[in-house]
Amino acid sequence: MLLFRLGPRYLFIRSKNIDEVADYLEASLGGDVTEFWKAWEKSSEYSTICFITDINHEKTYVEDAVKIVLINDVSTVILSSIVNSHMCHLVQRVDMGPAAILMRTAGNEPALIDKIKEVFSAKEVDWYEGIGLGEKDDTIIAFTDKVLSGPVSDFLEPKLLIPQPVREVQNRLRLEGLKLITQSLDDSQWYELRINIYDSCGKYKENYDRLMYILSKLEIGMVLGESWTKDYAVMLYSVLTYQVRLFTFFTPKEIKKILLALEYTTEGKRIVDFDLYYKNKKIHWEKTAANSKERKTKLEMVKEYRTNMYKKLPPEDIAVLEDMEKSIQRSE
């Protein structure tokens, strides 16, 4: 479960031959000429966004870029490639922009941002301002409530510009990041939950694989352990279930919604029971309603939760999940 990771680096390249430099970056380094926000949508922690400007600037800013090129490689590889290919005559100057760190939020997002701002003596900025004001030994922290394992383009405001090198910010976040996130949770705690898997058709492994796939893709939390156990669904009558112990900052209600979405297929067919327990109390599906007056059937609520879950997944992950479910149904 990622709580923070690096974002792309920034290179400002000044040149009289803007088109030739952009063509070289495309042809030799697989660069993609694009716009700033589209570059963010495609970038990873190993990417570099290159801003190519003319030479008539004392300091360059994002707004000065005539062309923006996204390269899915680190800045040192780009610079060494320019030097070794004897293309230096096309470049007048290269400046390194600030580093970027993406941090995941949970609970009280403004409280977390305010605390980080205080800890690092940071300045509130937007992307353009932060990249323009920041130097190579500065760091921008951007906050998101999305998972960090893939590209991220949906950020909260504000961003924070920190006058410290990224390695120092990283080291401190490794020591204090979890504590800061915990303090920002609505009740300042994580939850230890038990998920019991029961399938009358015996497809335990298949449904376990689906569950773990979604927990991983949504970065829900950490699995503390798993084992076979007995669940007393009816007084004096036990059934064998497979239990997963989950440690997460998501509330039991939020986790129950995800489990309900996985109990049923997109066609509304129930294929497994995922029972959720918190502090030895079972969390019932009725408790996931937005309010006690909400009058929806269980299937209506499941459809809504499934739709919400799909909004958090890319199309390829949705396709994998549905293929797993089709495989279960074919083998019944």
Image (spheres, rainbow, N blue to C red):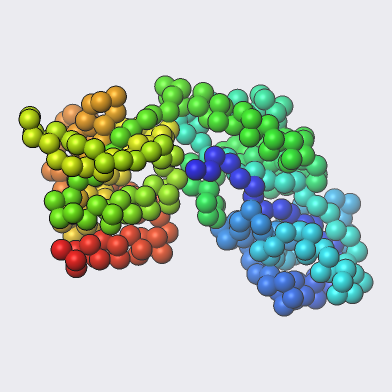
Total label count? 0
Left or right: where 6 falls relative to 201:
right
Q: Which quadrant of the figure has residue 68?
A: bottom right
Residue 151 picture location, percent across and down: 55, 55
**Is residue 20 left or right of 147 when viewed as pictured?**
right
Q: State whether residue 46 is above or below residue 227.
A: below
Examine the rendering and report whether any part of residue 182 can be seen: yes
Q: Position of residue 259 (x, y in %)?
A: 27, 44
Residue in the picture at 46% in, 22% down = 188
- Residue 163: image quadrant is top right
**In the image, farthest residue toward the front:** 228
> Would residue 204 be found to the left or right of residue 145 on screen?
left
Residue 327 appears at what percent x and percent y?
25, 66
Q: Say if residue 53 shows up in the picture.
A: no
Quarter of the image for the C terminus: give it.
bottom left
94 lies left or right of 109: right
Q: Which residue: 30% across, 65% down?
A: 323
The one nearer the camera, 46 or 332, is 332
**Quadrant in the rendering for residue 329:** bottom left
Q: Is residue 62 above or below residue 232?
A: below
Question: Taking 32 as reference, is 2 above or below it?
Answer: above
The structure residue drawn at horizontal position 53% and vertical position 48%, both measured from the top left corner, is: 148
Place of residue 273 in the rendered image (x, y in percent of width and height, measured from the top left): 19, 46
Residue in the image at 31% along x and 40% along y: 227
